[in-house]
Amino acid sequence: MKAPIYDVPQGKTPVRLLACGVPKGVESVINQLHVLRFAEVIAWTPPIPSPVEGEIIRILTRYVNLRR
């Protein structure tokens, strides 16, 4: 999966996190991560069809500083 990431903040590196599975399972995990204050629900992409029938993919992009 390759997709461009636009508007990358200066000095940051994008990291994508994927949630894949049946829609109810993916939504449950995203909601649990929200309760844990990991990410807002709206920060995830809308559901993307998966190559696996009946499953979806949602992507969260975070930006990190990489120190050498």
Image: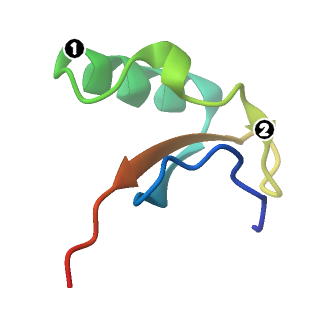
Relative vertical location of residue 20 with respect to residue 43 in this rendering, above or below: below
Element under disc 2: strand
Q: What amino acid is at disc 2?
A: Ile
Nearest to the observer: residue 52 or residue 42: 42
Find the residue positioned furthest to the front: 10
Name the residue beneath numbered marker 2: 48
Distance from the alpha carbon under mark 2 to that under mark 1: 23 Å
In-image side of 21 versus 38 (left or right): right
Q: Position of residue 1 (x, y in %)?
A: 75, 67
The furthest residue to the bottom: 68
Q: Nearer the viewer, residue 62 or 34?
A: 62
Q: Which residue lies at the image location 83% right of the left edge and 57% below the top edge?
A: 51
Ranked by sequence position, the earlier of labels 2 and 1 is 1
Label annotation for residue 11: none
**In terms of secondary structure, where does tag 1 sit?**
helix
- Residue located at (61% from left, 35% from top): 22
Quarter of the rendering containing residue 37: top left
Disc 1 crowd rating (10 Å Cα; few below 14, some 14-19, many 20+) is: few
Which residue is found at the position 28% from the left and 27% from the top? Answer: 33
Disc 1 residue type? Val
Image spot of residue 13 (x, y percent) = 44, 63
| Contact check, label 2 and label 1, Cβ < 8 Å | no
What residue sits right under mark 1 in the picture? 35
Disc tally is 2
* Quadrant (top left/top right/bottom left/bottom right) for the C terminus: bottom left
Disc 2 packing (10 Å; few <14; some 14–19; many ≥20): few
Residue at 77% in and 67% down: 2
Q: Nearer the viewer, residue 57 or 45?
A: 45
* Residue 52 place in picture, x, y as percent: 77, 55
**Percent x, y for residue 14?**
49, 58
